[in-house]
Image (cartoon, rainbow, N blue to C red):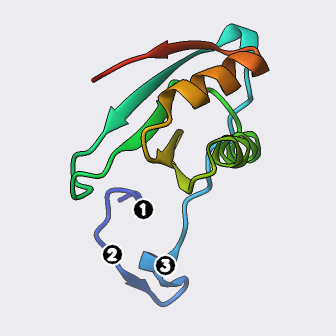
Amino acid sequence: MTAKKSKLVWSSEQGDLRDQKTTPVTRASLPPGEQTVYLHRETKGRGGKAVTVIKGLVLSAPDLDGLAKRLKQACGSGGTVKGVEIEIQGEHREKIAATLQGLGYRVKIAGG
């Protein structure tokens, strides 16, 4: 039986198998001119507070973190990277669109 299909949580050879981390998948970054970025406004599950979500980015983890930092500074707001999406606190779609267009990305504002 393979390790992925096994429900084994302890092995005398390997110890606690629940704590083993999977190897992260590394992604190559596409140039900004080849990417179309979608900006969404979401409030679901956040107590009615708006969050701007940037979707559709094809960037490596360090590049994604760097872009998130630049966008947070441009908006003067907090935010985070979740998976391959960037979340910025507040309604900042216009500021983010202008910043991303200045960096060479194609931007589409989606959602209400």
- Closer to the camera in the image, 63 or 71: 71
SS under mark 3: helix
Question: First in sequence: mark 1 or mark 2?
Answer: 1
Number of numbered labels in the structure image: 3
Which residue is more in the foreground, 69 or 6? 69
Q: Answer above or below: position of 35 versus 27.
A: above
Judge depth for marks 2 and 3 and give the one in front. Answer: 3
Q: In the image, is residue 104 above or below residue 17? A: above
Would residue 38 appear left or right of 98 to someone viewing this image? left
Are the residues at dot 2 and dot 3 in contact (C-beta closer than 8 Å)? no
Give the x, y percent position of residue 76: 63, 50
Q: Amino acid at mark 3?
A: Asp
Number of other residues with Cα within 10 Å of mark 3, as a class: few under 14, some 14 to 19, many 20 or more: few
Instruction: Give the side of residue 15 with respect to residue 5, left or right.
Output: right
The residue carrying mark 3 is: 19
| Front: mark 1 or 3 | 3
Residue type at mark 1 is Ala
Residue 5 point in image, percent of width and height:
32, 57
Marks 1 and 3, how far apart at CA: 13 Å
Residue 31: x percent and y percent? 77, 17
Which percent across, then down, holds residue 30? Answer: 73, 20
Mark 2, other Cα within 10 Å: few <14 / some 14–19 / many ≥20: few
Label 2 sits on a secondary structure element that is loop
User: Mark 1 or 3 closer to N-term?
Assistant: 1
Asked if disc 1 and disc 2 are in contact, CB closer than 8 Å, the reply is yes
Q: Given the image, on which type of amino acid does mark 2 rest?
A: Leu
> What residue is disc 2 on?
8
| Disc assigned to residue 3 | 1
Judged from the image, the secondary structure of the residue bearing numbered disc 1 is: loop
